[in-house]
Image (tube, grey):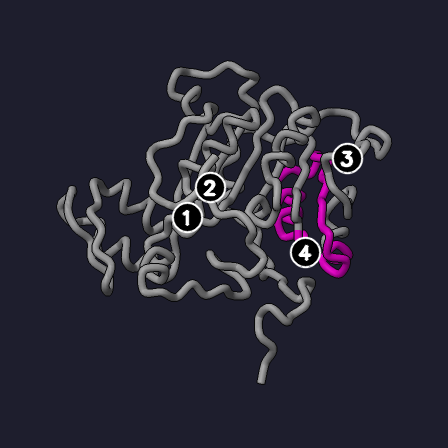
């Protein structure tokens, strides 16, 4: 009999070798100094090295075995909190103009602190690429309604996830910590992609029913949000220059919510 998921050592929670093309395709400018936080075995670094051979690549990875593998693709590998590192002492001569945060923030108790701590290390127009699991995914809502909240080795309910973000909540954390969203994309695959393909030609607004869950969907875009497994973002520092709409994301104002709790 295999161990329960909560009995397995954290360093056994490894992820497949993934170059994250769906995220890297959001780049609009050639990077020169890159920080890849949570670089795992270096798949992203390998792609960046091939496409931007002149760029200086820094990777951060706490898992010793993964870091050893990743080291062949990066100029520097860090195994500590990047917000406390003296990069200039390690040879960094310019601010980072690209940061990768691919499925990282949901593993942190305080992702707000990480994002805020990164700001002084970034160039004026840095490209910060972020991938976050979508907490409003329709199959997660269905499982919750059915009474089954099952943590797993990876995916939307990864056992090591600490924080959960919808697109709205993600935008709140970004704007409140000093970033604006330049671009956002939905990333959908597997059963969720099949559901989207099947339903996207429905008339909207209308009801979508999956098993015992029936949801009124206002538009094809809302259906895409419900089917997204990951929400992908390209951010840049906003330097306090915000539109009226952006100020709402940067504020403490939230729509009405129904879950129990107070200030």
Does residue 39 appear to the left or right of 217 in the view shown?
A: right
61 relative to 256, above or below: below
Mark 4 or mark 3, earlier in chain: 4
Q: Are marks 2 and 1 in contact (CB under 8 Å)?
A: yes
What element does badge 2 sit on? strand
Q: CA distance from mark 3 to mark 2?
A: 26 Å
The picture places residue 229, in percent across and down from the top left corner, at 41, 52
Q: Quadrant of residue 195?
A: bottom left
Q: Residues within 10 Å of mark 1 (few under 14, many from 20)?
A: many
Q: CA distance from mark 4 to mark 3?
A: 23 Å
The answer to if 51 sits in the magenta stretch is yes
Mark 3 or mark 2, earlier in chain: 3
Depth check: 235 or 255 in front?
A: 255
The picture places residue 34, in percent across and down from the top left corner, at 67, 35
Q: Are marks 3 and 2 in contact (CB under 8 Å)?
A: no
Q: Which range is magenta?
A: 40-69
**Mark carried by residue 41:** 4
Q: Which residue is mark 2?
A: 232
**Mark carried by residue 84:** 3
Depth check: 181 or 29 in front?
A: 181
């Amino acid at each position: 009999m295999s161990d329960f998921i909560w009995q397995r050592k954290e360093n056994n929670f490894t992820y497949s070798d993934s170059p994250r093309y769906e995220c890297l395709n959001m780049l609009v400018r050639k990077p020169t100094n890159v920080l890849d936080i949570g670089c795992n075995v270096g798949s992203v670094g390998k792609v960046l090295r091939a496409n931007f051979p002149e760029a200086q690549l820094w990777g951060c990875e706490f898992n010793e075995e993964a870091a050893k593998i990743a080291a062949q693709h990066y100029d520097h590998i860090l195994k500590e909190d990047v917000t406390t590192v003296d990069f200039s002492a390690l040879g960094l001569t310019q601010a980072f103009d690209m940061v990768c945060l691919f499925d990282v923030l949901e593993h942190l108790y305080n992702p707000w602190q990480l994002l805020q701590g990164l700001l002084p290390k970034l160039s004026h127009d840095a490209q910060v690429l972020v991938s976050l699991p979508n907490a409003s995914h329709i199959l997660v809502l269905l499982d919750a309604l059915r009474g089954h909240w099952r943590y797993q080795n990876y995916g939307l309910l990864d056992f090591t996830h600490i924080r959960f973000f919808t697109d709205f909540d993600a935008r709140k954390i970004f704007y409140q910590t000093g970033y604006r969203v330049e671009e956002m994309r939905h990333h959908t695959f597997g059963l969720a992609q099949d559901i989207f393909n099947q339903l996207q030609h429905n008339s909207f607004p209308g009801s979508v029913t999956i098993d015992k869950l029936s949801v009124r969907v206002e538009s094809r875009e809302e259906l895409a949000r419900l089917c997204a497994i990951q929400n992908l973002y390209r951010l840049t520092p906003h330097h306090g220059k915000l539109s009226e709409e952006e100020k709402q994301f940067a504020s403490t104002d939230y729509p009405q919510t129904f879950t129990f709790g107070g200030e």
